[in-house]
Amino acid sequence: MNNDDLRIILNTKASLVVIETYDEVRALNLLGNLFRQERLAAWRWSATEGIGHLGFGLQMGDGQKCFKPEEVLRHIKECMQASAFVLCDFHHYLDEPKLIRYLKDLALQETRHKVILLSHQLSLPAELSRYALSVSLSLPDEDEIMAIVREEARSWAAENKVERIKTDNLTLQKLVENLKGLPHHDVRRLAHGAISDDGIISESDLPELTRRKFELMDMEGILHFEYSTAHFKQVGGLKELKRWLEDRRLRILDEKSNIQDVPKGVLLFGVQGGGKSLAAKAIAGVWGLPLLRLDMASLFNKYIGETEKNMREALKLADLMSPCVLWMDELEKGLASDGSDNATGKRLLGTLLTWMAERKSRVFIVATSNDISVLPPELMRKGRFDEIFFVDLPDQETRTMIFKIHMKKRNLKPEDYNIGHLAVLSEGFTGAEIEQAIVSGVYAASARKAQVDQDGIEQAIVKTQPLSVIMSESIAQLRAWARERAVFAN
Ligand SMILES: Nc1ncnc2c1ncn2[C@@H]1O[C@H](COP(=O)(O)OP(=O)(O)OP(=O)(O)O)[C@@H](O)[C@H]1O
Ligand SMILES: [Mg+2]
């Protein structure tokens, strides 16, 4: 183990140090080693165990354990011998004025003691933060990850009395790649999980690993791992988009390709129900990449005042999950330039643009929107997205395909129907409206306890007032905008 990162604690003048990590065991180990080497008396404290030696040695008698936060701080203040104190989970108590004052007293003393606050997350009140040094534990590098995986493999093999576990170099390399960016204990846990199901590390362990890795980073409703992706076979039309994506497939999937050459992402805009969300799912499905959906609306709603931080963390997590598809559905909900909270929207946009410009990982963005007029112009400038696609209403040929797709989904045989005629009748319909017409036909038929026939679907079509009629003007505007600045996806 390496404790160079922590040596700074000894070299700095600051008495107060904050370490944020989920890896408490490792942090305590590293600190214990460090203080032992330096022959500095070191203690740890927690609310359940009170004060005890850090590492080895005599324990305190029960009378001296100072279970209460105030007692331990008083004890430190009165302690004559220069020592290090590691206080675990002290973040719970940082709203009590007296405790804050104690910590400030300790921070302002001549560098006699080191007081280390060790929590998974901790933010100091302003009167303390200027005196404190914040230190982070380094994450394991490739070699260390490989060492952990081998260790887990060895111990599994020993436990199960087999000579060695089965794997090959390429898969092992992929596994290591996948575990990058996680702290030591998580690497160990996930490696253990991948091995212990069957004693084999194979390609088939990787998707599960990705999912579990995602679960570790709890984003509480902001970033979702989408289990159901789609295939382009389920998407009618969008020929240009499909071709564009196919041309770039290799560059996305090739791990060796230069990050500059890896496609950044696309923006899909067009009428409601045109298949944008479906296409986003299909991109991930076809490329076999995990699909993460960023919920633009909940960025704002979740924690007031934390919008930007949420965005940064979501992007960081996407980096960690790469290669992946990051789907920003209904982009306008988060970034609309005329939203009520304009300043936040601007900062959010800034965060996104910076990340896109400085992108360091293979994250492919698929943004969708049906109201391009409210999107900030900065985002539409050349070079932000690789391409902006307009998803227009499906033409007759595409409508035919969409009918076939949705009939098959419902176990209807397309050849039993005159689909050519249905496609003519449904001029101006979106994919969603075509699907809806079939669904209505099915319902009407089952109410009559009959099979869906041509007539049933035709009736459903005739009864529908498609959106394109109601919104003809705004669709015309979208098209005009698209002609100048976008590529037609169909
Ligand atoms: N081109 C298409 N091919 C097959 N099915 C389609 C197509 N377009 C739409 N659909 C059907 O309509 C449903 C709704 O479409 P989708 O949610 O993808 O539209 P959208 O463009 O994202 O709309 P919105 O702007 O309202 O979000 C899809 O789940 C699919 O079943
Ligand atoms: Mg959608």
Image: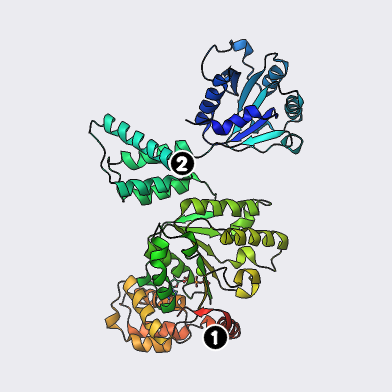
Residue 311 in which image quadrant: bottom right
The amino acid sitting under disc 1 is Val
Q: Which of the pair 316/434 is nearer the observer?
A: 316
Q: Does the residue labelled 1 lie within 8 Å of ligand 1?
A: no
Q: Distance between the residues labelled 1 and 2?
A: 58 Å
**Res. 287 image quadrant:** bottom left
Residue 80 in sight here: yes
Q: In this view, does 72 lie to the left or right of 438?
A: right
Question: What residue is shown at x 66% (from left), y 51% (from top)?
Answer: 306
- The answer, for residue 89, to whether it is visible in the render is no
Rendered residue at 59%/29% (across/down): 7
Across and down, in percent, residue 387 comes to: 52, 73
According to the picture, the residue beneath numbered tag 1 turns out to be 469
**Residue to which mark 2 is pinned:** 141
Q: Where is residue 10 in the image (x, y as percent from the top left)?
A: 63, 27
Q: Does the residue at mark 1 contact the one at mark 2 (Cβ under 8 Å)? A: no
Q: In which quarter of the image is residue 90?
A: top right
Instruction: State whether residue 352 is above or below residue 189.
Output: below
